[in-house]
Image (cartoon, grey):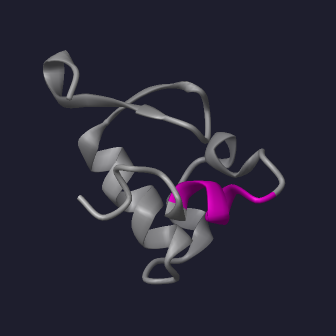
């Protein structure tokens, strides 16, 4: 993990807080609605698969 509890997110190619990661992960898994996350996390074509395959997805 990085300082300040931030991790590298492959959806935006930048660091995000762990809480944001958890929400994105839950959205990509269908546990939360897509409108729970900002559009910047959904810009990549197969963003759900990218998130599901991230090493932090199952944290």
Q: Residue at x 64, y 64 (%)?
A: 48
Q: Position of residue 51 (x, y in %)?
A: 54, 56
Q: Residue at x 17, y 29 (%)?
A: 5
In the displayed structure, would residue 2 be above or below residue 1? Answer: above
Number of numbered discs: 0
Q: Residue at x 41, y 71 (%)?
A: 26
Q: Position of residue 21 (x, y in %)?
A: 37, 49
Q: Residue furthest right?
A: 45
In the displayed structure, would residue 49 be above or below residue 50? Answer: below
Left or right, residue 38 beside residue 4: right
In the displayed structure, would residue 40 be above or below residue 58? Answer: above
Identify the image quadrant of the C terminus: bottom left
In the displayed structure, would residue 31 be above or below residue 47? Answer: below
Q: Main secondary structure of the magenta part?
A: helix
Identify the image quadrant of the N terminus: top left
Q: Residue furthest left?
A: 4
Left or right, residue 14 beside residue 11: left
Q: Magenta residues, as a range?
A: 46-51
Left or right, residue 36 beside residue 48: left
Q: Position of residue 13 (x, y in %)?
A: 59, 27
Q: Quadrant of residue 46?
A: bottom right
Q: Residue furthest bottom?
A: 31
Q: Quadrant of residue 10?
A: top right
Q: Residue at x 62, y 46 (%)?
A: 41
Q: Position of residue 32 (x, y in %)?
A: 46, 77
10 inside magenta stretch: no
């Amino acid at each position: 993990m990085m300082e300040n509890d931030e991790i590298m997110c492959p959806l935006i190619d930048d660091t995000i807080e762990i809480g944001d990661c958890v929400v994105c992960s839950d959205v990509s898994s269908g546990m939360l609605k897509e409108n729970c996350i900002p559009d910047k996390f959904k810009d990549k074509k197969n963003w759900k698969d990218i998130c599901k395959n991230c090493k932090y997805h199952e944290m």
